[in-house]
Amino acid sequence: MSRDRYDPLQMSLHWLMALLIFSAFGLIWYFNSLELGPQTFKLKFQVIAWHKWAGITVMFLLILRLAWRLGRGAPAPLPGQPAWQLKAAAGIHHLLYLLMFALPCIGWLMSSAKGYSVVLFNEWPLPDLVGKNIGLGDTLAEIHYYLGYTLLALVVLHIAGALKHHLIDRDTTLSRMLPRGR
């Protein structure tokens, strides 16, 4: 692997996880826009299942992504970047990784506490992490909600940083995460 860019698996995992995260947000916003009634019950149930699938898949892909990164490393930072930018980027990346793991875990805990199993792709039931406890489920739902918007804010900062590098600094930060020729 050329050390000036990410390898194809790292790029694929990055963009697949980005797609899944945006899908999870879109799905939960759609879910919340639907009225609960006889005509929408099945649809709401399916939409929330897709939201859970996206989140749990992100969590498992993150484990693979971090293991791969530990083994393969990442390209060195571009020369000439201010120390504060490097620290900010590292901090945002660490928080993104933390939330990409914590949010699905909290969502899974919340589902378990509310008495709803997580069944991945309608095939593989995941074990309940806690017994039914509606009060705990409500607390976890609130935490999940606020951490979700925290993740969204960090994603916006991440995108803004990449665009700043690409459009203002005109360096190769963004192109290192894109397939060759982009």
Image: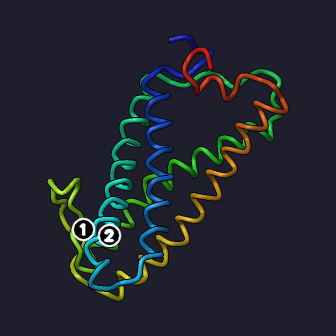
Q: Is residue 62 left or right of residue 18?
A: left
Q: Is residue 1 left or right of residue 166?
A: left
Q: Is residue 109 left or right of residue 28?
A: left
Judge the density around disc 1: few (<14), some (14-19), many (≥20) Cα neighbours within 10 Å: some
Whether 39 is drawn above or below 122: the answer is below
Whether 10 is drawn above or below 148: the answer is above
Colouring mode (rainbow / by chain / secondary structure / one colour): rainbow
Q: Which residue is mark 2?
A: 109
Quadrant position of residue 150: bottom right
Q: Secondary structure at mark 2?
A: helix
* Residue sitting nearer the eye, 128 or 26: 26
Judge the density around disc 2: few (<14), some (14-19), many (≥20) Cα neighbours within 10 Å: many
Residue sticking out furthest to the top: 2
Residue located 57% across and 15% down the image = 180
- Residue 17 image position (x, y, % from top left): 45, 43
Looking at the image, tell me whether mark 1 or mark 2 is earlier in sequence order.
Answer: 2
At label 2, which amino acid type do we have? Leu
Residue located 65% across and 47% down the image = 91
- Residue 75 image position (x, y, % from top left): 60, 22
- Residue 132 image position (x, y, % from top left): 23, 82
Residue located 55% across and 11% down the image = 2
Q: Which residue is mark 1?
A: 129
At label 1, which amino acid type do we have? Leu
* Residue sitting nearer the eye, 154 or 122: 122
Q: Are marks 1 and 2 in contact (CB under 8 Å)?
A: yes
Q: Secondary structure at mark 1?
A: loop
For the C terminus, the image quarter is: top right
